[in-house]
């Protein structure tokens, strides 16, 4: 679909830009839910510049992480997509989940361009886990566009609008 065709009419001559987000690569189960992306976009929107540090529990609530750990560990040896070749520990720990989350964020694209130049798992001064992030300029501009609409494409092709909390 051409970029011009993807603009939603907002009214008179104003068009709302629509951005398509997806996680690329592999057969692994995707742990980056649309809610995580929406929280991350909100953090980027509120921050000056393209580099920031974000606490993981600020974008992935503890309950979501606990749920994902149950799903991953229950299905780990039942299906290939839950094995995550880079995680050796069994059961998968919270740190392993965060490692997968970081890798999947690094492979996230917006309109076929990468979103981040850097996503690095770090320990914050509080002792909590976080990501040191450097956004690409196209992704930063999209995040700063308060009228933008973001669509998340799931691995099966289903699309969902990402809600951004202000």
Image (cartoon, rainbow, N blue to C red):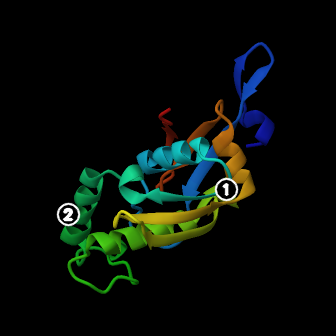
Please state which of residues 21 and 123 is positioned toward the viewer in this rendering: 123
Q: Are marks 1 and 2 in contact (CB under 8 Å)?
A: no
The answer to whether one can see residue 43 in this image is yes
Q: Earlier in the sequence, mark 1 or mark 2?
A: 1
Give the residue at x 68% y 44%: 142
Left or right of 57? Residue 113 is right
The answer to whether one can see residue 24 in this image is no
Please state which of residues 7 and 117 is positioned toward the viewer in this rendering: 117
Give the residue at x 73% y 52%: 138
- Image mark for residue 50: 1
Label 1 CA crowd tier, 10 Å (few <14, some 14–19, many 20+): some
Image coordinates for residue 98, horizontal then vertical, percent = 38, 68
Q: Quick one: SS at disc 2?
A: helix
Q: Quadrant of residue 95?
A: bottom left
Image coordinates for residue 17, horizontal then vertical, percent = 71, 35
Q: What residue did someone put label 2 on?
A: 70
């Amino acid at each position: 679909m051409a970029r011009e065709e993807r603009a939603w009419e907002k009214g008179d001559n104003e068009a709302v830009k629509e951005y398509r987000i997806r996680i690329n690569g592999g057969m692994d189960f995707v742990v980056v839910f649309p809610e995580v992306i929406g929280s991350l976009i909100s953090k980027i929107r509120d921050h000056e510049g393209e580099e920031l540090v974000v606490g993981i529990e600020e974008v992935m609530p503890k309950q979501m992480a606990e749920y994902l750990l149950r799903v991953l560990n229950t299905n780990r040896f039942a299906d290939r997509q839950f094995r995550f070749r880079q995680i050796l520990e069994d059961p998968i720990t919270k740190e392993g989940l965060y490692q997968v989350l970081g890798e999947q964020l690094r492979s996230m694209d917006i309109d076929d361009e990468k979103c981040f130049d850097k996503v690095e798992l770090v320990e914050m001064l509080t002792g909590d886990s976080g990501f040191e992030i450097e956004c690409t300029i196209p992704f930063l501009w999209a995040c700063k566009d308060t009228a933008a609409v973001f669509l998340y494409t799931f691995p099966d092709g289903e699309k969902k609008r990402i809600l951004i909390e202000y």
